[in-house]
Amino acid sequence: MFYCRFFKVNRDTNWAVLKNQSHLHELNVKKMLPYKILTSIVLPQDEFDVLCENIHLPHLAYKKFAIRSVADLNGIWNCIVLRGKNKNGELIIYTAGQMYPLYAGIGE
């Protein structure tokens, strides 16, 4: 099981916003939530960068997995992990079965 700080995704959510929110929660010792990895997808770096600037929009890379990104019987989220070929950070999304992310977080 893995842990992450997740935040509600809206039109203004991007990598910088998630990074800032995560840092603020870390300073305030906010709780990290458990999650499981449904799938991990590596994207070309330029495609990952565009995705990270428009997190609220659905993306073809995870389309076939989105319907299975739901909570298990214990309430643990099954998440989709996305990363760029040249970037160390991971974008972790939870869709609740929708075609777009409802919550997102950053994994290092």
Image (cartoon, rainbow, N blue to C red):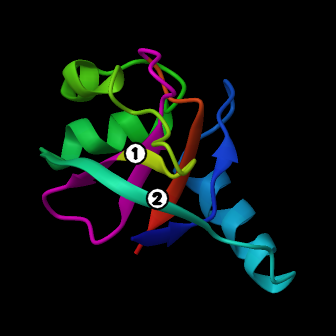
The spot of residue 53 in percent (x, y) is 48, 37
Which amino acid type is marked by label 2? Tyr
Which residue is drawn at the image coordinates 20% and 28% (left, top)? 61
Q: Name the residue under label 1.
A: 78
Magenta stretch bounds: 80-99
Residue 94 covered by magenta stretch: yes
Which amino acid type is marked by label 1? Asn
The spot of residue 93 in percent (x, y) is 45, 42
Looking at the image, tell me whether mark 1 or mark 2 is earlier in sequence order: 2
The spot of residue 89 in percent (x, y) is 35, 67
The spot of residue 75 in percent (x, y) is 57, 47
- Vertical order, 13 against 88 (above or below): above
Give the quadrant of the C terminus. bottom left
Crowd tier of the residue under label 2, counting other residues whose Cα lies within 10 Å: few below 14, some 14–19, many 20 or above: many
Q: Is 32 left, or right, of 72 in this rendering?
A: right
Name the image quarter holding residue 62.
top left
